[in-house]
Amino acid sequence: MFIFLLQLRHMLEGHPELYLFAVYSALIWFLWIVKVVISRRYRPFTGTFTGTTSVVVPVVDEPLDLFRDVLGRMVEQRPGEIIVVINGAQNPALQEVCEEFAPLVRWVHTPIPGKRNAVMIGTELSNGEITVLVDSDTVWTENTLAELVKPFADARVGGVTTRQRILEPERSWITRWADWLENSRALYSMPTQSVVGQIGCLPGRTIAFRREILVRVMEDFMTEKFLGVFLEVSDDRTLTNLTLKEGYRTVYQHTSLVYTDAPLQIKKLFKQQLRWARGSQYNTLRMLPWMLGHAPLLAMFFVMDIVLPFLLAGVIGGWIYRALTNQGVNFYEGILEEYGFQSGIVWVLGLMVVSSVLSMAIRQMRHLAEKPSDFFRLPWFILVSTLFLMPVRLIGFFRMAHASGWGTRAGAYAGGAQNDAIASALEALPKDQLDESWASGTADPGVDTVVDVPEGDGQTAVLVRSRTRAAAKTAAPKPPRRRLNPRAGIPYLIGFAIFALEAWFIA
């Protein structure tokens, strides 16, 4: 704030210089003011929705105590059904936990790892009007489901998300920072976008959609590419995009609260944030033509998410260049002359820290109203958010067209027909072929209904379903050989062109 005011005064005095930091700071304040003004109109939905619900929980591996608690809290809120999709390797321990809550909870297994594939299978098996997608480490609070479905009383609403916080945020500085970040989004960005009915990304820890929408968009969800690649990451943003393009509103229900876990190691935090950065920017560029025509507010927010890290990099580069070449206006000259070099440096640094803290405190006033003690952690929050998050977003931009699955999981769904046999079988089989015996109450709980589905090449998918579980089993195909994507260079060209333009501007 201190240097911003000095640069602003210098420009207003008629000097021709245009400072990148002044532009960067002005954009930050402009976006914050827009969010504050619009979000003041936000109100949670209070209507009554009486339709049916299905909960789908993709899972790979979770601590059994946590997973048992996750399912137990869902069961208490009595959705129509809970379908757990275990993907990847068989996990008998998770299966046993699921069967503790039968018949409301049933499980299905697919050998193909990947959340999108699990979402597809769970959606196909679901029966409710509303499909609720839940991460396997997300803990519901009282009335999470009842509050979550209230917006669906409005027929225009197609997707809803919850307020999300981090479990036990006091465990480490990482969890504390992650919880602060989540709360800031919940207090500014989410209400702002919800007011206009266009939340650009419904966070997927717990997210609800009209099932009919998921069915219509599933083909695009499983195959849509950009710059020649399919990204398994950012499934929640992709489903949100597709829901908006179907003409529905996407909204935020502040009264529906869930808690989720956060990484405890810097390496895992980096991988998580990089995955989110890649998926977010990938989807922004893919969705930008639609947003410019139908959701200009979203376009502005998401384009700024891409632009601001580049601007900040230019600002830092400009400071280094001017320090090495001794060029530019010395805004601290008066202070250094007044107090001497050593004392002047202390004054400059002190003013910079104090002004930065006060600036951030104003922009975080809603969070600080809930947790005043965080005021004393503001310098740390600024440093972590700036020196860690901004570079991660730059790396994510450059790598957005690199072909990859979910993180480092080998064999993850890669945007093709890897599991088409199972999907087609689930679509083609009459419901009564699988449901009649146990839905009527006459089936033996220990006897499975087995249907063989030819897949070609001598392989067979075996669909198994009983009163307490639904399983889809097949030999996992070998992952396709990864090929170099020539279009992966496009983000690098764009990024380096931006850096070159900034360098020319600075020099």
Image (cartoon, rainbow, N blue to C red):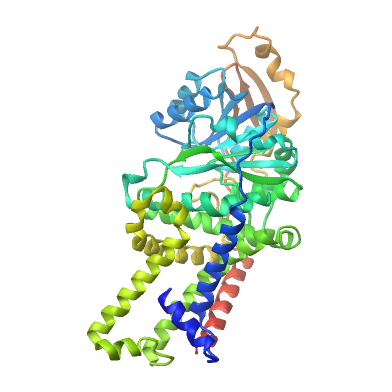
Position of 340 relative to 90 (above/below):
below
- Dividing the picture into quadrants, the one containing residue 324 is bottom left
Q: Is residue 111 visible?
A: yes
Position of 452 relative to 57 (above/below):
above
Position of 390 relative to 173 (above/below):
below
| Left or right side of 59 for 39 | right
- The percent coordinates of residue 145 (x first, y second) are 57, 31
Residue at image location 59% in from the left, 53% down from the top: 39
Which quarter shows the N terminus?
Answer: bottom left
Residue at image location 30% in from the left, 74% down from the top: 350
- The percent coordinates of residue 398 (x first, y second) are 54, 67
Position of 269 relative to 448 (above/below):
below
Residue at image location 55% in from the left, 45% down from the top: 412
| Left or right side of 159 for 372 | left
Q: Pick the residue in front: 506 or 458.
A: 506
Q: Pick the residue in front: 405 or 144.
A: 144
- The percent coordinates of residue 249 (x first, y second) are 70, 46
- Dividing the picture into quadrants, the one containing residue 477 is top right
Residue at image location 43% in from the left, 63% down from the top: 360
